[in-house]
Structure formats: structure tokens, C-alpha cells
Image: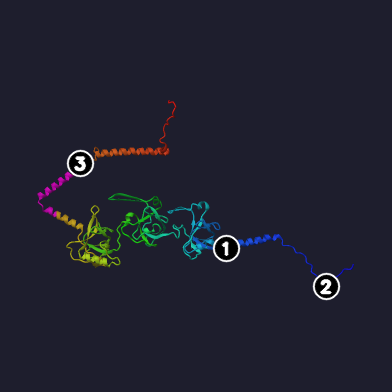
Amino acid sequence: MAEEFPSKSQPLKPVVKPGHRLSPIWIIPVIAAFLGLWLAWKYFSERGPQIVVRFETAEGMVANKTPVMCRSVNVGTVARVELTDDLKGVEVTMQMTSEATRLLTKDTQIWVVRARYDAAGISGLSTILSGNYVELEPGLSTQARRRFTGLEQPPVTPKGVPGLHITLFTNEAGSIAAGAPIFYKGLSAGKIESRIFHPESGKIEFGAFVSEQFAPLVRKNTKFWNISGIDVQLGANGMQLHVGSLESLLAGGITFGQLDAAISAPPVSDGASFILYDSLSDTKKFVMRNSLPYLLLFTGSVRGLNQDAPVEFRGVRIGTVNGVSFNYLPDDPDRRVPVLVQIDPTLITNLPTESTEPAEKFVAEAVRNGLRASLKIGNYLTAQMYVDLDFQKDAPAASVTEVAGYQVIPTGGSSLAELTDKASALLDKLQALPLEETVKSASAALASIKATVEDLKKTASGYGENGPLYQKLSETLRQLDETLNSIRSLSDSIERKPNSLIFGKPGRVAPPKGTPRP
């Protein structure tokens, strides 16, 4: 049978066959691709900036392991630890999260948390098990920053805590260090934040923080003093013992207060400076507010007049002796003894304090009216002397003069010279008396002395071995010895059996009722 072919006039028709469907195996790579893109997006979206922090040592920090925390929230990880170019420290690169970007400002503080024991107490004990970590404390600034200098010690007071920041200066630090407590009437009122030594002045500067509750109590007349240790004072009123709290004894501490509550003073602001006194007694020492230097020239001996001796006006201290030296006036032809004093005329009367001119005029007018300086004995046992300023009757006319650049107040007679004159006058009177009267006076004096000695013997006999006072003292000592023996026995019993305080002294136990007696 012959094969039929389409004619040229008839067009060819395409043959359509059904195609293959997409294989289900392609779903897996597509999902993997989308998952990889999502993970990459999540990684870069959560990835924050890198910061570099300089420390003295990298103790406790491990790359890709040590976390960076902010108030117990993870905000980054230590990425790299390297030595600095000068080999004097380390630079730690930290990879921060995106949430930490707003925390990295100019005043942000960063330090390593590890187990520590210092004046602030024991801290970081949790790191013994979990390991060290880096702590970040956000600041108050809005200026961004990426390079920091890490703190070797954690800050005592976090940023933004309301309160008062002040500065204290002292010559001796003692046991006061960063973290030491500040008390007010036994209550915790703040802490010492920093301690800096200034070698050029020899002063020690403390940065202190007073909490918001006690900040209004810090005023311009407030005194700060050290209460570390035990302060023992022995004076005319007996022995006085001042002991701080247990915390201040162990870690040191300071306290403050207004010694003169009757004098009102305005409160202070941040940055105010105060003197830190060594003890409460030092805060009560004489202080001048607006003093003037004057030179006193004495013709007699000034033995017993020491530096820091008081200058008084009618029993009230108004100044201090700064020094006694011929160097103040080396070319004086009379070789008078120069004594440089510092006095505060405002302690005598109310004077303007804007300048020293009103005080100088007051002193000059007082000298014209008879004010003179003299030496007087303050203590006859130690022969210590002081400078007394007072108006003298019939004083010759004088005024304040200037010698070698010093303002000079004229001087009068001293108490020592007056005693010498009186003794000389007494000797002259005795020499003028007849011999018989002198002998009678001496005999009467001897008889009086003999009677006084007999009285002393009678008084002392009461303290003899057979005296009543001796017998009473012996009986008291015997009773005291018995008491000490009882206390010693009690102590031994407690040491051997502590529960004896509750159950009594061990002994024979009574038999129960109904038991026949042996």
C-alpha cells in the first residue's frame, strides 16, 4: 500500500506533547536558601558596633567567651585581646549588640568584674563559679564614643544617682580609701569615691558622695572628721573615749555635722571643698576668718612663748603666734625679740570682710587709745606663755608703725617682769625690816609649816596598814578577787560544756518517783 504524503497545499501541524512537572526535591534547597538569607539578615541586624577598651591587664578575659553585661543583660562579647604598641597595657576589642549602640556614650564606664575585697566590702563572689565578665555602666551624655579607657576598680557610685559630690582635703589619709563609708549621726550617708595624692602640695584629695537624703545637711559651716580607730583624750574632765562603729573600725570612715547649730549657713552645691580633720577635737581648734599679720617687739626674754601660742584679748582668743625669730628684723639696733602674730579683729567687733582696710583702721584706732601687747604666763607648771592684747592705763602715746614691711603694734610690760619686780620689792621690804622682826616672822612661818606637816601626817595615817581606808581597800580587793575567780570558773564550765547555761551544771540526776532508795 503506497504511503501518503501531505500535499504542498496542506500546512504542517505541530505535535504537542505534555511536559514533565517540577521535581519535589527542589523544595529543600529553596528552603535552605531562604533560611540562610534569614540567618544572615538576623546576624547583621543584631550585630552592633565594635569598641576598643584599654586596660592595664587582661586578667580574666578570654576572646569569644567573656561576655559584656549591663545590669545583668548581655550586650556584647570580648572578640579580641591584644597588647598595646607601647607594651604598657592591653587593648580589648568587644563586639557589641545593636541594642548596646545607645549605651556607648562619652561618659560610659567599663570595668572587669572579679572577686574583690576592699574598703567597700566583698564583691564579685559569683564570678568564682561563672568566671569574670565585663560590666558596662551607661553614662548621661548623648555624644557617641567607640574607644574607652577601662576602670581598674569598679565605681563606688553609679552615674545618675541623685546626691551631692564634694571634695575633701587632708594631710594624712590614715585608713580612708575609696569605698570608705560616710556617716551622719551613726547613719550611712554616703561613700568615698576616689583618693588622689598631690605630691606638689603634700595634700590628699578625696572625692566624696553624699546621698540625696543627707545632701541638704552639708552646708558651708559643716565640718568633716575622721572616725577611724579609737580616740582617747585625757583632760581636766577625765578620760574621754570615742569609738566609731564596727564598720569604721575595720574599713575606716568619716562623719560630718554642724558644730555650731545656732549659726545658719547656706547649703553647698556640687564641687564644694572641705577640710577633713583628723578627729573631732581638731574641728574645735581656733580658726580665723579674716586675719591680719602684725609684728611685736619685746625687750625681755620670750622663753616659754612657742609657735601657735594663743593671742588673747581679755581672755578671748583672737589670734595665733606664727613665729619667733630675729630673722624678721635682723638689723634692729636694740636687738628686740620679734614675734610675728596673726590676729582677727572681727572676733572683737563686727567689721566688713570685703577688704582688710576696716580691720586695719580698727586696730590703729585701738592702739592710739592704749592697746598694747604683753607676755603673760598661761601655765605656771610648764612656764608656757601667751600674748595678751589689752588697753593699758597711762600708756604713752603710740601708733601702729611700719618696720621692714611689717605693721608693728607697740608692746608693754610682761607678767614675768611684773613678778620679778614684785619679788625684788618684797626682798627690799624684808631687808628694811629690823633683824628681830625678821626672825620673829621666820619663826612664825616655820611654826605654820610645822603645823601643816603634822596635819599631813594625820591625814596620811589613815592610809597606813592599820588605817580604816587601808582595811576597806583590802576588803574590796578580796571581794574583787573572789568575783574574778567565779567568772573564771564560769568561763571554764562554758568552755567544757556550752549548754550548761541552759541545762545547768552537770550533776547527779534524781531517781524517778517510786524507785526504792538504796
Disc assigned to residue 458 = 3
Residue 446 falls within the magenta-colored stretch: yes
Q: CA distance from mark 3 to mark 1?
A: 104 Å
Mark 3 in CB contact with mark 1 (< 8 angstroms): no
Percent of width and height locating residue 223 = 34, 57
Percent of width and height locating residue 107 = 47, 63
Percent of width and height locating residue 207 = 40, 59
- What is the span of residues highlighted in magenta in the rendered image? 427-452
Mark 3 vs mark 1: give the one in front: 1
State the quadrant of the N terminus: bottom right
For the residue carrying disc 1, how many other residues have a C-alpha within 10 Å: few (<14), some (14-19), or many (20+)? Answer: few
Q: Who is closer to the viewer here, 185 or 137?
A: 185
Give the amino acid type for the residue marked by disc 3 in the picture. Lys
**Residue carrying label 1:** 45
The residue shown at (52%, 51%) is 129
Give the amino acid type for the residue marked by disc 2 in the picture. Gln
N-terminal-most mark, 2 or 1: 2
The residue shown at (63%, 61%) is 36
Residue 244 against residue 410 in the figure, above or below: above
Quarter of the image where one finds residue 25: bottom right
Disc assigned to residue 10 = 2
For the residue carrying disc 2, how many other residues have a C-alpha within 10 Å: few (<14), some (14-19), or many (20+)? Answer: few
The residue shown at (65%, 62%) is 33
Left/right of residue 460 with respect to residue 154 in the rendered view: left
Helix, strand or loop at mark 3: helix
